[in-house]
Image: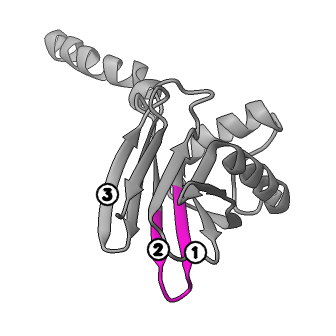
Amino acid sequence: MKYLQLLIAFIVFPLVTSYDKLHDYYVGVTEIEYAQEQRSLQIISQIFIDDFEELLRKRYDEDITLAPDNKPEIIDDYVNRYLSDKLKISINGNPVDFIFIGKEYKDDISYCYLEIENVSNIKSIEVVNKVLFDIFPEQQNIVRLKLLGKNKSFLLVPDNDKCMLNFD
């Protein structure tokens, strides 16, 4: 019986003490899709809530909590300001601004919805994605581009934070 208790302790103890280390990787996903009828780029950026909340606390307000009913206007302003600073898009070599549509929380991910209007005649698109690089050096950002018949994914890291897709 003592042997069984010792065995259980050796199995359970590492699991309990490593609970905080379950989140050993940091990854975000940004999808950019061209809606031809609307002539717009529709963007969804997915960021883990706990990581995003930590960043917003360090950068803007140490008491902020990312929850649906908690100060949505203030949080929207912080999210918009941060994403405008860290996510840059250029079309045909010209920087363009996105419109922050809103955000929602599902499970442990925040979904941020953005749009770039009046887009046509795309010859190239460049994306710089530095989201969360400022507080998590291990952060990786996947950028998925779906436009003009091409689907391409890129993995961005702090030392290589930009990607480009040409259509010529």
**Which callout, 1 or 2, points to the residue nearer the camera?**
1
- Displayed quadrant of residue 104: bottom right
Which circle's residue, 3 or 1, is located before the other in the chain?
Answer: 1
Label disc, if present, on residue 129 of the rendered structure: none
Q: Give the residues in magenta.
A: 32-45
Q: Nearer the viewer, residue 7 or 78?
A: 78
Please tell me the numbered disc located at residue 34: 2
Magenta run includes residue 37:
yes
Image spot of residue 1 (x, y percent): 15, 15
Of the numbered discs in the image, which one, if any, rests on residue 119? 1
Q: Position of residue 146 (x, y in %)?
A: 38, 67
Residue 108 visible in the current orientation: no
42 vs 124, left or right, is right
Q: CA distance from mark 2 to mark 3?
A: 13 Å
Q: Residue at 70% x, 62% y: name it.
A: 68
- Does 35 sit above or below residue 1? below
Mark 1: secondary structure: loop
**Closer to the camera, 24 or 7?**
24
Q: Determine crowd level at label 3: few under 14, some 14-19, many 20+ residues with C-alpha closer than 10 A.
A: few
Q: Amino acid at mark 1?
A: Val
Instruction: Report, in whole angstroms, how far the alpha carbon at label 1 lies from the one at label 2.
Output: 9 Å
Mark 1 or 2 closer to N-term? 2
Q: Residue furthest front?
A: 168
In the rendered structure, which amino acid carries the disc numbered 3? Lys
- Quarter of the image with the C terminus is bottom left
Q: Main secondary structure of the magenta part?
A: strand
- Residue beneath disc 3: 152
